[in-house]
Image: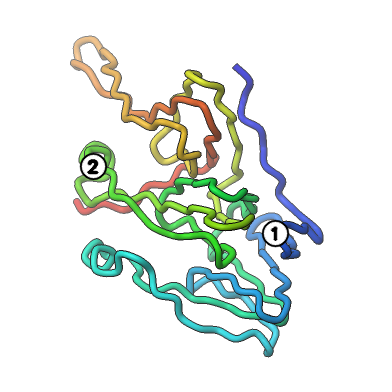
Amino acid sequence: MERPVLLPTSARSENFAGLVYHLDGELVPALTVELMKGQNIYFEHHILLWKHPDITIGIRAMKGALKRMIAGMQIFITQAEGPGQIAFSRDGAGHVFGIHMKQGEELHVREHQFLAATDNIEYTFERMKGISNLLYGGTGFFIDKFHCDNREGILWLHGYGNVFEKNLSPGEQIDVEPGGWLYKDKSVDMRTNVQSISTGIFASTNLVTNRFTGPGRVGIQSMYYHMPTSE
């Protein structure tokens, strides 16, 4: 099996879907997007680092607001309209990168790791039943879904540590530590895999992983991330 490949950690004047962006920095990287007049992107409100004064900031409502509110998730996201430059950075060490999405593509991302996206990418979510009970103490586990609707777009994510990508062929599988996976293509199947490990006189313990089956991409972050759970 080919091992996962490290994604680029920097970009200078990357141009896609009519937008130019830059990725700078190593320990706590920053994303800078150059917006022309009338161009829009949306982002998590707490990640803004700096912006040009001509950038207009507004609020964008999300679909399924009531369900998100009940789940304790954000129901509004922040939107920026050009012209000008705007920069984002998450308050933590990691890896910022852009995924260039073609029309009709859909990407599934673990919650709280979305950074920004072009305005044509639809943002919804799905609660993953069963996984939360095994891995998160019943607190709930959500997957953010991003669908590129009517033209090409860009989705920017933040991974903890460094981010690697494995492109699975049809039927090919990989087991990933539950806090280690970051994103997957819609075509990739994800299931919880529990393996009992005997410890002799001390009975047994369970090894829990997420098993991904291709075809499609799986993103893996080298610093495991788990949502805090109640004691």
Tell me where residue 54 sits by quadrant. Answer: bottom right
Which mark lies nearer to you, 2 or 1?
Answer: 1
Judge the density around disc 1: few (<14), some (14-19), many (≥20) Cα neighbours within 10 Å: few
- The foreground one among 103 and 7 is 103
- Residue farthest along the right direction in this orientation: 13
Above or below for 78 versus 165: below
Front residue (pair 131, 144): 144
Q: Tell me which residue sits at (22%, 17%) in the image.
A: 204
Q: Pointers 2 and 1 in contact (CB under 8 A)?
A: no
Color theme of the render: rainbow
Residue at horizontal 46 percent and vertical 42 percent from the top: 224
The mark that comes first in sequence, 2 or 1, is: 1
SS type, badge 2: loop
Disc 2/disc 1 C-alpha distance (Å):
35 Å
The residue wearing badge 1 is 17
Residue at x 65%, y 56% (from the top left corner): 27
Q: Is residue 88 left or right of residue 110?
A: right
Give coordinates of residue 95: x percent, y percent. Answer: 62, 51
Q: Position of residue 90 (x, y in %)?
A: 55, 64
**Residue at the far front in the pictured view:** 150
In the rendered image, which residue does mark 2 sit on? 129
Q: Determine the residue positioned at 60% across, 74% down.
A: 40
Name the residue type under label 2: Lys
Q: Is residue 205 above or below residue 223?
A: above
Q: Could you tell me the amino acid type at mark 1?
A: Ala
Q: Quadrant of the N terminus?
A: top right
* Residue 88 at x, y percent in the picture: 61, 69
Residue 73 shown left or right of residue 92 in the figure: left
Label 1 sits on a secondary structure element that is loop
Q: Position of residue 178 (x, y in %)?
A: 39, 37
